[in-house]
């Protein structure tokens, strides 16, 4: 009952802010609510406060004692929602595929079903000695991706 009420309030809060989306919701046995959100334009402290209030102000502490924590998805935490890919176009991702491939490449495109990654590699020349730089591209369906995350380079 309590969990359903929390989910309902969270959904209402997210409906008011369509730029925000849910990454994870956990409610422990002791009613510790943990919400992880992300946003199409990033997440500000104010966004976390908005979602926290949307839930907290509509629950009765006399009825259920609870704690609430709303955080944003970490910059390097693995993606859990396809919307996270769209906001990271142009960034370098580390992607592990279901078939065991590991790719480090630039995310260039996303759509409802897949992503496109591009990278450059050195390969032997087709004719003669030496190597040339070749641009590679792969399209991956979301269900072919085991894990993906942004690589932060300084």
Image: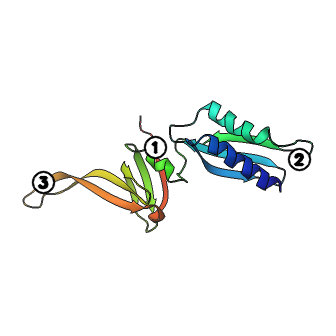
In the picture, measured across the screen, residue 132 lies left or right of residue 94, that is left
The residue that disc 3 covers is: 130
Residue most toward the right? 62
SS category of the residue bearing label 3: loop
In the picture, measured across the screen, residue 22 lies left or right of residue 147, that is right
Distance CA(mark 3)–CA(mark 1) = 39 Å
Image quarter where the N terminus lies is bottom right
Q: In the displayed structure, would residue 2 be above or below residue 76?
A: below
The residue that disc 1 covers is: 87
Residue most toward the bottom? 99
Q: In the displayed structure, would residue 56 be above or below residue 110?
A: above
Can residue 28 be seen at all in this image of the molecule? no
SS category of the residue bearing label 1: loop
- For the point 61% across and 48% down, which residue is it? 22
Distance CA(mark 2)–CA(mark 1) = 37 Å
Question: Residue 124: x percent and y percent?
Answer: 16, 58
Distance CA(mark 2)–CA(mark 3) = 71 Å
Residue 10 vs residue 101, the one in the foreground: 10
Q: Earlier in the sequence, mark 2 or mark 1?
A: 2
Label 1 Cα crowd, 10 Å radius (few <14 / some 14-19 / many 20+): some
Q: Earlier in the sequence, mark 2 or mark 3?
A: 2
Q: In the displayed structure, would residue 123 be above or below residue 42?
A: below
């Amino acid at each position: 009952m309590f969990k359903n009420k929390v989910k309902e309030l969270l959904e209402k809060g997210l409906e008011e802010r369509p730029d925000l989306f849910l990454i994870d919701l956990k409610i422990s046995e002791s009613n510790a609510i943990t919400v992880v959100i992300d946003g199409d334009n990033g997440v500000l402290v104010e966004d976390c406060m908005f979602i926290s209030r949307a839930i907290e102000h509509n629950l009765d502490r006399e009825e259920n004692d609870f704690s609430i924590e709303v955080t944003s998805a970490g910059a390097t935490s693995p993606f859990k929602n396809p919307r996270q890919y769209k906001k990271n176009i142009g960034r370098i991702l580390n992607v592990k595929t279901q078939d065991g491939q590991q790719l480090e490449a630039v995310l260039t495109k996303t759509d409802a079903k897949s992503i496109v990654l591009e990278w450059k590699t050195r390969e032997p020349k087709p004719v003669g000695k030496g190597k040339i730089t070749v641009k590679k591209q792969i399209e991956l369906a979301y269900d072919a991706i085991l894990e993906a995350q942004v690589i932060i380079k300084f």
